[in-house]
Image (spheres, rainbow, N blue to C red):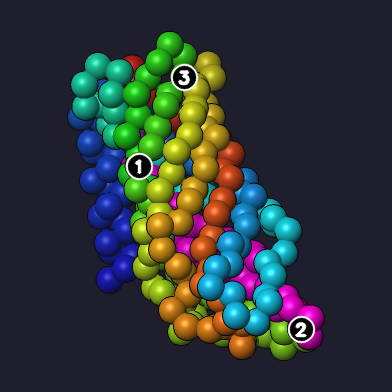
Amino acid sequence: MKKFTLIFALAFISHLALAQNGAFGPRFSLLSTELSLSENVNNAQSGDAEFGYQFGVFARIGIRKSVMLMPEILFSDTQATISNNNQRADLDFNQINVPFNFGVKLLFLRLQAGPSFNFITKAESNLNGTIQDISDNYRKATVGYQVGVGMDLLNLFALDLKYDGALQDINKQSVLGFESDQRQKMLVFSVGLKLVSGKK
């Protein structure tokens, strides 16, 4: 059912992009991710920012002159670290990210912002060499936001630099005894290939 929904969404978005003289194609992103902790009751600390990646598809759908809707469907793999004086846990997340940014073209730049809907498909921890499935400790779906800027190169490549922030905690209970609320922040650099390209 999930695969059918994704295929239908991809087909619908590509059809809209074609109908509105927009753009559609694959996208790959490099991520710098950081886990932010709050309401921390046992002095847990998050590690330094770590690299991850995304891949999927993007579209641009023209709304008015120089105004566009830019939906994406992406799969991401990210890591994070939580530690205190006694132990350290390495976390690994797989997610499906669905940003819906609105963009405005200003000269050769695209200014963009909008909500991002995130669905965790896998969450694992590595604590002292023991791998554990901790998916039940995390919310299946969360809402965040994106702001960024982009430009096109040779009317073929779409380059974007975005900040992806959290509007809610991703965990719903303590994780491995670390009592804190977790929010994931990402700096995203992406390159898209415009297989279908209009004026947007």
In the depicted structure, whether residue 147 falls above or below residue 170? above
> What distance separates the C-alpha of mark 2 from that of mark 3?
46 Å
**Of callouts 2 and 3, which one flags the residue occurring earlier in the amino acid sequence?**
2
Q: Quadrant of residue 70?
A: top left
User: Is the stretch drawn in magenta largely helix, strand or loop?
Assistant: strand
Q: Is disc 2 in contact with disc 3, using a CB cutoff of under 8 Å?
A: no
Q: Which mark is residue 87?
A: 2
Q: Which mark is residue 141?
A: none
Q: Give the amino acid type for the residue marked by disc 2 in the picture.
A: Gln
- For label 1, the crowd category at 10 Å Cα-Cα, with few meaning under 14, some 14 to 19 and many 20 or more, is some
Stretch of the chain drawn in magenta: 70-97
> What distance separates the C-alpha of mark 1 from that of mark 2?
38 Å
Q: Give the amino acid type for the residue marked by disc 3 in the picture.
A: Leu
Q: Which residue is mark 3?
A: 109
Nearest to the eye among marks 1 and 2: give it. Answer: 2
Q: Quadrant of residue 80?
A: bottom right
Q: Give the amino acid type for the residue marked by disc 1 in the picture.
A: Gly
- For label 2, the crowd category at 10 Å Cα-Cα, with few meaning under 14, some 14 to 19 and many 20 or more, is few
* Residue 64 in picture, x, y percent from top left: 21, 21
Nearest to the eye among marks 3 and 1: give it. Answer: 1
Q: Residue at x 38, y 51 (%)?
A: 116
> What distance separates the C-alpha of mark 3 from that of mark 1?
17 Å
Q: Secondary structure at mark 3?
A: strand
Left or right position of 114 against 12: right
Q: Which residue is mark 1?
A: 114
* Residue 126 in picture, x, y percent from top left: 70, 80
Residue 192: tell me if it is visible. Answer: no
